[in-house]
Image: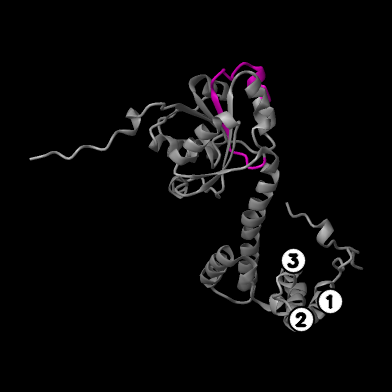
């Protein structure tokens, strides 16, 4: 009788690293938990708020909560998972106080920055990597599962490219190389598609509720799921609805209803409708002879006209809207 061989223990593989997390927000503990599944050893985490401490306890049980300096002292691979605006000062401070060691892998997860922000750590001999998971995190264990197949925006010195991509693969992700100069544009694209989508969905649910729909989420689920799938498959060719058809009367009715019931949503509707009309025209989906009346409707109601002037009520249109 033969005995089936046991699968190799991940911990027996070479180059297993002691992993530390500075900033126990939604991202860091999930990434460290994923690295643990690959055989690496989370050894320390820092977090200030009660929520951070709870996340660390849930996703990294038995990993001690210590100061950022102590995290670096215990770690060979450090994940800096803090807000974008905090990152430069954190790196500078850690480098100046001697917390960063030569040969230490220092990884940040910011979409905005490449490895340039890690310059102070590089100058003291650290190995800088920028690994940004293109995913929305919940701060719960479900994030570890969702990392499977998640794309990561990877930026690193050329000699560390293979190491950076290997870490992503170990977390279950798919590495996508982003040049240093392209990081801000890359991040803007993700924010446009992800963050603004949440705002649009929330506004749509709000309006459906106002219209008497008892379960807006159930109504929108199949519609938005199909729209997203069609858009990812076909791009602009998936456009449907009154704007792409040039139904100026229907759009005018929308504008009137939003002005009456949800004026706070109207500027966003108009801005998105104008962008949709522009794309539909460029792709030949919107007939030019129907576009004039439609664009006339979209230029009304005190928003900017097509030449960028402001309306009579003092509101701001395309150029002045905050789209961050």
In three-dimensional space, the C-alpha distance between marks 3 and 1, rounded to whole angstroms, equals 14 Å
Question: Marks 3 and 1: CB-CB under 8 Å?
Answer: no
Q: Which residues are magenta?
A: 92-112
In the figure, 313 relative to 249: above or below? above
What residue lies at 77% left-to-right and 73% top-to-bottom?
259
Q: Note whether residue 54 is visible.
A: no
Give residue 165's position: percent from left, percent from top: 51, 38
Q: Is residue 96 magenta?
A: yes
Question: Marks 2 and 1: CB-CB under 8 Å?
Answer: yes
What residue lies at 65% left-to-right and 36% top-to-bottom?
114
What residue lies at 63% left-to-right and 18% top-to-bottom?
124
Q: Is residue 253 magenta?
A: no
In the figure, 211 relative to 64: above or below? below
From the image, tell me which residue sits under label 1: 296
From the image, tell me which residue sits under label 2: 248
Of callouts 3 and 2, which one flags the residue occurring earlier in the amino acid sequence?
2
Give residue 76's position: percent from left, percent from top: 49, 23
From the image, tell me which residue sits under label 3: 275
Where disc 2 sits, the SS reads helix
In which image quadrant can residue 161 be found?
Answer: top right
In three-dimensional space, the C-alpha distance between marks 2 and 1, rounded to whole angstroms, equals 9 Å
Graded by Cα atoms within 10 Å as few (under 14), some (14 to 19) or many (20 or more), the crowding at tag 2 reads many
Counting every numbered tag in the picture gives 3
What residue lies at 63% left-to-right and 23% top-to-bottom?
122
Of callouts 2 and 1, which one flags the residue occurring earlier in the amino acid sequence?
2
Q: Is residue 163 left or right of residue 178?
A: left
């Amino acid at each position: 009788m033969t005995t089936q061989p046991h699968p190799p223990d991940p911990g027996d593989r070479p180059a297993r690293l002691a992993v530390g997390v500075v900033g126990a927000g939604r991202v860091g503990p999930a990434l460290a938990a994923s690295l643990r599944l690959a055989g690496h050893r989370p050894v320390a985490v820092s977090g200030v708020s009660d929520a951070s401490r709870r996340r660390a306890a849930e996703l990294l049980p038995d990993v001690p909560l210590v100061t950022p300096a102590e995290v670096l002292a215990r770690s060979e691979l450090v994940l800096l998972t803090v807000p974008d605006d905090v990152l430069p000062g954190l790196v500078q401070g850690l480098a100046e106080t001697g917390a960063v060691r030569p040969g230490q892998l220092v990884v940040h997860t910011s979409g905005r920055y490449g490895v340039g922000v890690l310059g102070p750590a590089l100058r003291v001999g650290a190995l800088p990597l920028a690994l940004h998971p293109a995913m929305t995190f919940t701060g719960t264990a479900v994030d570890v599962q969702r990392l499977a197949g998640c794309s990561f925006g990877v930026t690193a010195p050329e000699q560390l490219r293979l190491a950076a991509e290997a870490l992503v693969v170990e977390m279950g992700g798919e590495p996508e190389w982003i040049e240093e100069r392209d990081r801000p544009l890359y991040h803007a694209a993700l924010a446009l598609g992800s963050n603004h989508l949440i705002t649009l969905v929330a506004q749509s649910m709000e309006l459906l509720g106002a219209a008497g729909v008892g379960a807006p989420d159930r109504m929108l689920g199949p519609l938005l799921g199909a729209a997203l799938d069609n858009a990812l498959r076909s791009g602009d060719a998936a456009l449907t609805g009154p704007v792409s058809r040039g139904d100026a009367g229907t759009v005018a009715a929308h504008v009137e209803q939003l002005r009456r019931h949800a004026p706070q949503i109207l500027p966003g509707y108009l801005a998105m409708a104008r962008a949709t009309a522009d794309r539909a025209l460029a792709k030949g989906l919107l007939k030019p002879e129907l576009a004039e009346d439609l664009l006339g409707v979209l230029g009304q109601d005190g928003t900017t006209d097509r030449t960028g002037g402001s309306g009579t009520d003092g509101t701001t249109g395309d150029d002045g809207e905050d789209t961050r």
